Image (tube, rainbow, N blue to C red):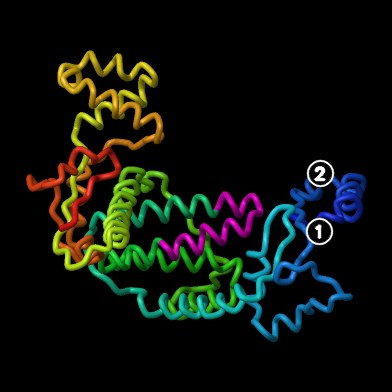
């Protein structure tokens, strides 16, 4: 049974079983046999109600296994809580995860080895967010924060996958890497279905013995992730304007990006703080815009605007076809046509929009 890596139990056992375990090992064994770590959790609830025999709201492990199977049972227990919070068995979560795991099984088998060649911008985005997420998942696992690990390593990854598939036909090599990484991350939680996927993909041995996914810091690119968030936000803004203004029969969305002088002022504000206005007045071009600059600095401070410089026009041009498909309108970027002078409202990270 040794080495003794980890023991986890309820928080009520800290003062007896867990303490006795630590003291007895320290008294009886050499240091290499001592426990390396302890973890504790709260008292389990069933659908938000404390589990007790008197209330009759309890299941035996065999009962829960017969209803949901081992994988869903393990996953629901792991996702129920972390730290000293009282973990909660969520029946609706258990029911939904059964079908979600089956969907992942089918997706992995059907899509492995398929896709296009060649690297696109959106492929680099997926590489970045997945490497960042693998890093966060490893950190959560090391801290025994299993709910967080599942949130990052499954729900976040699936959200990124859905967006990626929406954006473009997947790159074959990248999709294969994603499928393997996602299945390996799931394996400690739902080993049975992951072993089945592993075998059907033609992999050797057991996935439980395979190396956990690793991340590459050099693949994590803040600028690419910011650019894609900018595209998402722009689409959401166009849809919101159409809905709130109840626009009908529109044909074109005109998008006006922030003028360069606003980026310059924003960078000055980030660097100089309250002395930004003084710094701006040393610039000939900004001095000519004195009132505009002053008002914009006030806006930066009041709205806490903080955006790193990016080529908004280039980003939108690259995503033009996708945006048009999402909003159902033709997209014009920084057009001369601006009947309501919307361009003056554009700020870094938040373009102005006119729909006609």
**Percent coordinates x, y for residue 304 in the rendering:** 41, 34
**Percent coordinates x, y for residue 144 in the rendering:** 66, 54
- Is residue 143 a member of the stretch shown in magenta? yes
Q: Residue at x 59, y 77 (%)?
A: 192
In the picture of the structure, the residue carrying the numbered disc 2 is: 31
Question: Is residue 88 positioned above or below 31 on the image?
Answer: below
Of labels 1 and 2, earlier in sequence is: 1
Question: Is residue 35 positioned above or below 287 on the image?
Answer: below
Q: Is residue 341 left or right of residue 152?
A: left
The image quarter containing residue 277 is top left
Using the image as rendered, state which of residue 168 and residue 249 is in the foreground. 249
The C terminus sits in image quarter: bottom left
The image quarter containing residue 12 is bottom right
Q: Please, which residue is most extreme toward the bottom here?
A: 66
Q: Nearer the viewer, mark 1 or mark 2?
A: 1
Q: Residue at x 25, y 65 (%)?
A: 326
Q: Is residue 318 left or right of residue 140?
A: left
Q: Main secondary structure of the magenta part?
A: helix
Give the class, few, some or many, for how many residues have Cα within 10 Å of label 2's Cα (few <14, many ≥20): few
In the picture of the structure, the residue carrying the numbered disc 1 is: 10
Q: Residue at x 36, y 48 (%)?
A: 219
**Percent coordinates x, y for residue 207 in the rendering:** 54, 70
**Count of marks placed on residues:** 2
Using the image as rendered, state which of residue 143 and residue 253 is in the foreground. 253
| Segment tinted magenta in the rendering | 138-159
| Residue 3 in sight here | no
The N terminus sits in image quarter: bottom right
SS class, disc 1: strand
């Amino acid at each position: 049974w040794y080495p003794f890596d980890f023991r986890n139990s309820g928080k009520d056992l800290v003062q007896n079983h867990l303490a006795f375990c630590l003291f007895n090992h320290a008294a009886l064994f050499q240091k290499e046999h001592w426990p390396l770590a302890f973890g504790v959790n709260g008292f389990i609830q069933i659908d938000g109600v404390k589990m007790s025999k008197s209330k009759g709201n309890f299941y035996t492990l065999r009962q829960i296994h017969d209803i949901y199977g081992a994988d869903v049972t393990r996953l629901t227990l792991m996702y129920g809580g972390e730290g000293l919070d009282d973990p909660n068995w969520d029946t609706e979560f258990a029911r939904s995860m059964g079908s979600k795991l089956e969907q992942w099984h089918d997706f992995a088998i059907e899509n492995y080895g398929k896709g296009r060649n060649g690297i696109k911008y959106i492929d680099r985005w997926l590489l970045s967010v997945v490497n960042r997420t693998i890093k966060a998942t490893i950190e959560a696992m090391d801290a025994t924060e299993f709910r967080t690990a599942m949130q990052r390593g499954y729900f976040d990854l699936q959200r990124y996958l859905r967006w990626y598939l929406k954006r473009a036909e997947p790159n074959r090599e990248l999709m294969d890497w994603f499928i393997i990484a996602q299945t390996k991350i799931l394996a400690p939680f739902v080993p049975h279905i992951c072993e089945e996927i592993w075998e059907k993909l033609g992999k050797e041995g057991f996935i439980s013995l395979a190396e956990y996914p690793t991340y590459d810091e050099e693949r994590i690119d803040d600028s690419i992730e910011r650019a894609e968030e900018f595209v998402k936000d722009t689409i959401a803004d166009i849809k919101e304007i159409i809905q709130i203004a109840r626009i009908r029969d529109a044909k074109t969305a005109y998008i006006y990006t922030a003028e360069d002088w606003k980026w310059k002022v924003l960078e000055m504000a980030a660097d100089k703080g309250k002395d930004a206005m003084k710094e701006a007045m040393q610039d000939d071009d900004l001095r000519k815009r004195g009132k505009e600059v002053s008002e914009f600095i006030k806006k930066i401070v009041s709205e806490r605007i903080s955006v790193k410089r990016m080529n908004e026009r280039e980003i939108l041009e690259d995503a033009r076809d996708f945006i048009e498909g999402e909003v159902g309108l033709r997209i014009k970027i920084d057009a001369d046509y601006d009947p309501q002078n919307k361009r003056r409202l554009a700020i870094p990270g938040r373009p102005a929009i006119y729909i006609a």
